[in-house]
Amino acid sequence: MDATKTHNLQDAISVANSNFCNPDHLEFNNYMPWDYVIHEGVLAGARSMRLSPQWGLKHNTQTNDGGEHKAMLYPDFATLLITSGEDSLGNPTLVSRVLMLIEIKRMISEALDDRDCQLGLAKDQVIEQCQYAFHEDINISRIVIVACSGPWWTYQNIHRNELLPLSDYYDPTYDPSYGDDGQDDEDQDDDGLVHLAIQEWSPPFDLRTPQGLQKLLELRPILEQIKDKLDGGTEKSTLCAFQWVIAKLQAVFGRRTGA
């Protein structure tokens, strides 16, 4: 990021965490700096990767009476790969796949205990969101997950085999934060979630420092590697899919307005 963008980021962080602008230390004030640094930094120049707030992740399960139970999770931000595909009729369409999930919590204070507590909450939620994303799309094998508390952040590059898969059957007594019933305590990691293979989170980084910003920008090549393994369409085919979808929307809009 150039000097102007870096200054803009620092201004956004200051506004989000100042006692005057955010006296109650609310979480949503931190969306502004994180939206800015991902758009202008990590994803700068990317044509097929997009950032979406509150991206919905579904987990539909079958109930004992043959019905369907629908659950949704909404990470604060998701980085998506947008590429081309085909619908059931063979027409070009757009496909979105999750590359990165970001969960943000407020920064209560600069005290390390407060920071680690908030990061712990974000870790728990983003890991569960990751389970949903893997369950929803069998083509995804890796996702970068980022847990934040204000400007503090930590991450993992996690493989689907490192998390227990979600069940296809609905259990009203099941709490996904603690895995399947009957698991021994030693199977649980520090996040309270059951992993098949425990992986360490990165140390916490501070986005207000050059080192913390640089470490975040270094997520780009990791995202590119994941993208390259998923991207089945060329830039030309993705552009054609965009044009096809836009034409369909225009046709529907025209019919509704009589144009």
Image (cartoon, grey):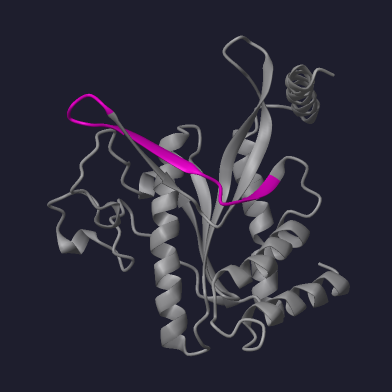
Of all residues shown, which one is farthest toward the left?
A: 182
Q: Position of residue 79 (x, y in %)?
A: 62, 49
Q: Position of residue 236 (x, y in %)?
A: 81, 26
Q: Quadrant of the N terminus?
A: bottom right
In this picture, is 92 found above or below 19?
above
Q: Residue at x 85, y 19 (%)?
A: 259
Residue 201, magenta (yes or no): no
- Along the viewing direction, whichever of 52 and 254 lies nearer the viewer: 254
Q: Residue at x 61, y 9 (%)?
A: 89
- Residue range in magenta is 50-67
Q: Residue at x 68, y 31 (%)?
A: 83
- Along the viewing direction, whichever of 192 and 61 lies nearer the viewer: 61
Q: Is residue 247 left or right of residue 193?
A: right
In this picture, is 256 found above or below 8?
above
Q: Position of residue 231 (x, y in %)?
A: 65, 33
Res 209 seen here: no
Which of the 4 image quarters holds residue 233? Answer: top right
